Amino acid sequence: MATPRSTFSNKFGFVAAAAGSAVGLGNIWKFPFEVGKGGGSAFLIIYLIFTFVLCYPILVTEIAIGRRSQKSAAMAFKPLGHPKWTFVGIIGVICGVLILSFYNIVAGWVLGYFVEMLLGNFEIGEHFDTYVTDIAEISGYTLAFLLATAYIVSQGITKGIEKASKILMPSLLVIMLILTAYAMMLDGAGAGVAFYLIPDFSKIDLNVIYRALGQSFFSLSLGLGALITYGSYLSRKEDIVSSGIMITFADAGIAFLAGLMIFPFVFSEGIEPEGGAGLIFMTMPGIFKTMGPTLGVVIGSLFFLLLAFAALTSTISLLELPVSYMVDKHKIKRKWAVWYSAGIIFLLGIPSMVGFGYSDFFTNFITYVGRTEPVNFMDFVTDIASNTLLPFGGFLVSVFAIHIWKRRKLFRELSHGNPGFTRSWLAKYISFTLTYISPPVLGAIFIITILEVFFGVKII
Ligand code: PFF
C-alpha cells in the first residue's frame, strides 16, 4: 500500500518553507554583486520588473502543477496526462544538481567566515582571494554544510524543512535591518545609495537583461521544478495565489534590503562594486571591525551564521529535487537517495571550488566567442544552469500550462483555496502573462543569448 504523501501543516508552513527556499545566498550574496556588475540601479529595475511581472505567474503555475499531480518535478507531468513533458522536470533536476554543486561551496565560505568572525579575524575581508584558495579548509566547510543539508532532507519534509524555516528567516531579517540602519549612518553612504537607487538607463544592455532575468529565476527558486515539488506537499485547502504573492514579496524584499545594506558599506570602504563573487566577503568584515572587538564579533558571527541558515533552507530544497525524483521514480529509500545525490554533488562542486585561483585551468575556464575575459567554472555553471536553463524552464512551464494542460485546468487548481479566483483581475493577469508575455519574451531572450553570449553572434 502506498504511504500517504506528507503535507505542510498549514499555509504559513508552506509559505515559510517556499520563502525559505527562495531567500538564500541568491539574495544576500549573489544579488548585490550582480547589481554591482550590472551598473547598479539599472540592474535593480530590470530585476524587479522580471520578478513581479513575469515570474510571479510562473511561480503560481509551478505550485499548481505540483499540487495537482501530487508528484515531484520530474514525475509531475505524467499524472496530468502528458508524460512526454517529463523532460522538463528532468532538466530541472539536472539544473538543481548543477546549482547545488557551486551553491554549497559558497555556503562553505560563509561557514568559514562565521568561524573567522567568532575568532575576531576581521582582516579576513582583505584576504578573501587567498582564503578561497585554501582548499583543505574550504572543502571541510563545504562538506560540513552538505552533510547538514543531507541530514535534514533525510529526515523527511515537514519535520526538517518547516521547523528550520520558521525560526530562522525572521532572525535574519532583524539583523539585516540593524545593519542597514548602521550602513545609513556611515560616511559615504549617500554614494552607495545613489549607485543603487538612482536609475541610469544607459547601463542597460543585453548582458544586464540576461543576468537580471537569470537572477529573478534563481532567487525565486523558479524554473527547475523546486516549487512543483513543494506544491505537491501543499494541501488543497490552501490558497496558492496569495501564498505566491507573499513568497515573491518576501524574496524581492530581502534582496532589495541586502542591496540597501551592502552598497553604503561598499562605498564607505572604497571597494569596487564590480568585485564579483567576493563582494560581501570583502566588505562585511571591515564593517564589523568598526563596531569594536566585542560587538563586532557578536554581530559579525551572527550575520554569517544566519546567512548560513538562509543558505541551508535553500540547499534543502535544491537537494530535494534529485532526491524526490529518485524516491518517486525509482522507489529508492529516501535515505539512500539523499546520500547518493550528496556524493555526486560534492564531486561536481570540486571544479567550482578550485576555480578561484587554486587551479588556473578552472579559474580561467572558458572564454565565450566574442568575449575577451575568460570566466571561471562557477560563472560558467551559473551561465548555463541559472541564467539560461531556468528561464528556459519558465518558458516551457508557461507553454505547457496554457497550450497543453490548458488554462481551464490550471485555473481550476488555483481556485482550490481561493474560490473567487477565476473572476478576479489576478486571474486575467496570470492568464495574459502566461499566454502573451512569458513565451515570446523568454523564448526570444533564450535564443538571443544563446547566439550572442555563447556564440558571439551580434544580434542587438
Ligand atoms: N533561491 C535560492 C537563493 O536565492 O539563494 C537558490 C535556489 C534554491 C535556486 C532552490 C533554485 C532552487 F531550486
Image (cartoon, rainbow, N blue to C red):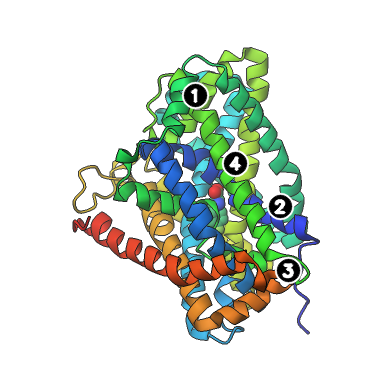
| Mark 2 / mark 3, whichever is N-terminal | 2
Q: CA distance from mark 4 to mark 1?
A: 16 Å
Q: Is mark 4 within 8 Å of ligand 1?
A: no
Image location (x, y in percent) of residue 448: 28, 61
Please, what secondary structure does the residue beneath circle 4 have? Answer: helix
Front-most of 252 and 452? 252
Q: Is residue 389 visible?
A: yes
CB atoms at circles 1 and 3 under 8 Å apart?
no
Residue depth check, mark 3 versus mark 4: number of the one nearer the observer: 3
Q: CA distance from mark 2 to mark 4?
A: 14 Å
| Mark 2 / mark 1, whichever is N-terminal | 2
| Mark 3 / mark 4, whichever is N-terminal | 4
Image location (x, y in percent) of residue 437: 43, 66
Image location (x, y in percent) of residue 125: 48, 24
Three-letter residue code for mark 1: Pro
Please, what secondary structure does the residue beneath circle 1 have? Answer: helix
Q: Quadrant of the N terminus?
A: bottom right
Three-letter residue code for mark 2: Ala
Residue depth check, mark 2 versus mark 3: number of the one nearer the observer: 3
The residue under label 3 is 418
Q: Quadrant of residue 273?
A: top left
| Mark 4 / mark 1, whichever is N-terminal | 4
Please, what secondary structure does the residue beneath circle 2 have? Answer: helix
The residue located at (40%, 36%) in the rendering is 199
The label shown at residue 264 is: 1
Callout 1: 10 Å neighbours few (<14), some, many (20+)?
many
